[in-house]
Image: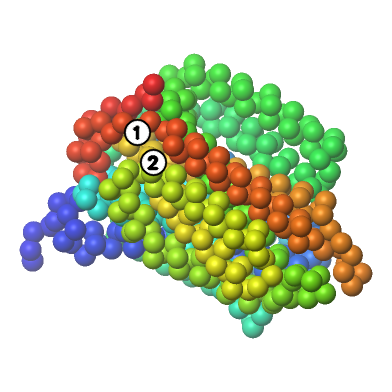
Amino acid sequence: MGPVPPPGDARGPRARLTVPVLAFGGILMAVTQTVVVPLLPDLPRLTGSSAGTVSWLVTATLLSGAVLTPVLGRAGDMYGKRRVLLLALGLMAGGSVLCALTSDIRVLIAARALQGASAAVVPLSISILRDELPPRRTASAVALMSSTVGIGAALGLPLAALIVQYADWHAMFWATAALSTLGLLLARWAVRESPVRSPGRFDTWGALGLAAGLVCLLLAVSQGGQWGWGSGPVLGLFAGACVILPLWWRMQLRAKQPLVDLRLASGRRVALPHVAALLAGFAFYANSLVTAQLVQAPLASGYGLELSIVATGLCLLPNGVIMLVLSPVSARVSTARGPRVTLAVGAALMALGYVVRIVDSRELWVIVAGAAVVATGTTFAYSALPTLILRAVPVEQTASANGVNVLMRTVGQSLSSAAVAAVLVRHTSLVEGVQVPTLGGYRLAFILAGTVALVACAAALAIPSEPAPEGARTTAGRGGPAQETALDGR
């Protein structure tokens, strides 16, 4: 038997499988969050509940994912990234099993909340890749890992639609349970625990404060359209967020070992990528959301194609293929020109894709082409964001910092969903006795998303272009002690 390869060595079979295993976990996370979408119209009948109650199957996953991503990221930095990654994958598998075993809407909502923990898989995996891989492999691996969010989302919809159409709806959750269990076992076998730790005590009060503030904010945003933006509960939730989050911010600045290092996060080299992540998340989500609704609109609307759910999923499938194929290309651009340029190019491409959508949204090939351009831009933007964070924070804070960056994407997607819904609701016409969005409403949504993408491009260009510290280039990817000094961004 030959010698055991050292950490970061790509010769051992486990080391060679680390990247594909982690990417598989990221894709599973996105698939798990997406598969319930085709079921939503039928679940009120299948579970004996109202449409409003069923919508919590999406809301619960969103809220738990937003809350747990930065919390589990910090826990990974402190107690071991592999350990927390396995916990997140285990919760994803357990939630899938619960969904497969029940038709009780209350249990389903609780199970979907468990699955929300899987949102931490991507930032934890990115941090593991930084610790374990040699620097020459880190950029491409991180780009692939970041793109798994879009790849999984594009694969999840047609997969779920096929299962729902040809099998019992519980089979969909049995499939995700089997895949999640496989991902857990593979990660346990292939992923080595990183020795890089951030010692100290976990900031429990900081985690509770962040959870309370995010729940108030995201619940108000996600349910505002259904409850009424001027209703008492929504206004109360927004007021709660406005009170809790500033208090949490002040508490974090005073804490000796905060959940989120706000002084580091306030520097331009960290703050601007977080802002760009929020804006990119907004622009990315509008692409999938609006495309799915537009192609399913009735023919009588004058623009709709009246496609089935399966056909709609197949229209979105090329986006996932694009993100898979172009992730190494985006990594090479980041290596040659820097991730700041890659992010700016990606945001500009997203805006260009929406220009295509504005010009023509009647022909299927133009719709698919425009969505593909947006997906191309998303690949470049999403692959650059974690690289920017990795270059700007100490090695012992990578999981928590990337967790916050993923959180900002989630907030952007939530805002996108609310904004697009508000636009389409205000621009409708009566078609065969049913109110459907007008083509002008869709174009207005494209204008909004394209404008946000341009703002993301401007944020990218404003990021300081100074190179990373020498420690970041030499230590990252080796799993050694934390020797890096973060740039303060000033």
Residue sitting farthest toward the right: 433
- Asked which secondary structure carries label 1, the reply is loop
Query: What residue appears at the point 79 percent right and 38 percent down from the top-left corner?
Result: 234
Measured Cα–Cα span from mark 2 to mark 1: 7 Å
User: Compared to 286, does 243 lie above or below?
Assistant: above
Q: Disc 2 residue type? A: Arg
User: Compared to 161, does 79 lie above or below?
Assistant: above
Q: Position of residue 112 (x, y in %)?
A: 62, 56
Q: Position of residue 29 (x, y in %)?
A: 50, 58
Residue sitting farthest toward the left: 2
Counting the numbered discs, the total is 2
* Residue 138 visible to an observer of this rendering: yes
- Left or right, 246 with respect to 317, comes to right
Q: Which residue is mark 1?
A: 465
Counting other residues with Cα less than 10 Å from the Cα at mark 2, is it few (<14), some (14-19), or many (20 or more)? many
> Which mark identifies residue 317?
none
Query: What residue appears at the point 92 percent right and 69 percent down from the top-left corner?
Result: 433
Query: What residue appears at the point 51 percent right and 61 percent down from the top-left corner?
Result: 373
Q: Disc 1 residue type? A: Ser
Q: Position of residue 218 (x, y in %)?
A: 67, 41
- Asked which secondary structure carries label 2, the reply is helix
User: Compared to 452, does 95 lie above or below?
Assistant: below
Which of the pair 233/387 is nearer the observer?
Answer: 387
